[in-house]
Image (cartoon, rainbow, N blue to C red):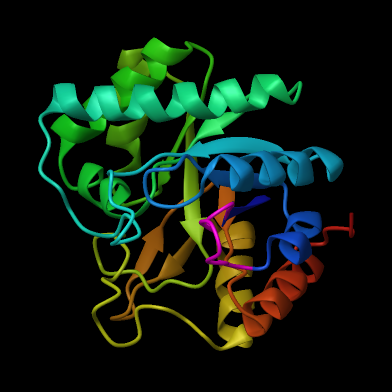
Amino acid sequence: MKLNCDLGESYGAWQMGQDDLVMPLIDMANVACGFHAADPMVIRKTLALAAAHHVAIGAHPSYHDLPGFGRRSIHHTPEEIEALMLYQLGALEGMCRSEGLTLSYVKPHGALNNDMMRDNNLLRAVMEAVRTFRTDLPLMIPVTSNYREHQQMAADAGLPLLLEAFADRAYDDEGQLVSRRQAGAVHENPDIIVRQAKSFADKGGVFSTTGNWLELPADSLCVHGDNEAALEAIKAIRKALGKSGQ
């Protein structure tokens, strides 16, 4: 199972995450496109860092919400969703080309990601934008109990699909991530994070907060590197999954 991480989320003098330390430990970097975080210099530095460690580059588009870090829902029509997606993909692909690189996949960020997983009209708009941009470009979405429906939607759209699981987030009985506003939504104990990562990798699923087993087969596992504890968890996950260091 490949490990992915949200990176390149600094902005000007504001530093977010430990990209230099995390990048050597992952397989896929979700690079902010400027709407929720990042500026041109941050993006360029992140791309160079990914290239140096042979990490696949994914676009991480969002609602246009720098003050809210893309975590606030903003109403858009499906046509507007397509436009904001295409704008961000074009910007990041242009930066990639300037460095002799290319996009490998797309993973929406924050509230946009959450909203599209609850509204198939928005999800179709996101899929249409990615397919329009490049027909061979995979879309990464969170795996939920409705993953078969989402796979069929992607197939109907002619779009490659990657399913993503989270090692450090709690799941409800529908296979959705528990809201960050609720207690216990984010796992902070490294042992729990590693145990959940192994459950996804070895068993193809995880237990919900109420103890129900969820079948959630995933292609990639999202890990976070915002602090030293999380960084150690990433290292432990790599070891638990039998991944050698880069």
* Residue 243 against residue 48 in the figure, above or below: below
Range shown magenta: 7-17
Residue ID at (30%, 18%): 128
- Is residue 246 something that shows in the picture? yes
Give coordinates of residue 135: x percent, y percent.
47, 10
Which quarter of the figure has residue 97?
Answer: top right
Q: Is residue 205 left or right of residue 5?
A: left
Predominant secondary structure, magenta span: loop
Q: Nearer the viewer, residue 42 or 202?
A: 42
Label tally: 0
Give coordinates of residue 200: x percent, y percent.
56, 61
Residue ID at (61%, 27%): 95
Residue ID at (29%, 60%): 71
- Is residue 152 something that shows in the picture? no
Q: Quadrant of the C terminus?
A: bottom right
Give coordinates of residue 94: x percent, y percent.
57, 21
* Residue 35 against residue 152 in the figure, above or below: below
Which quarter of the figure has residue 193?
Answer: bottom right
Q: Is residue 177 left or right of residue 6?
A: left
- Whether residue 43 appears in magenta in the rendering, the answer is no
Give coordinates of residue 86: x percent, y percent.
36, 22
Q: Residue furthest front?
A: 13
Q: Nearer the viewer, residue 95 or 143?
A: 95
Residue ID at (47%, 39%): 33
Q: Is residue 121 left or right of residue 212?
A: left
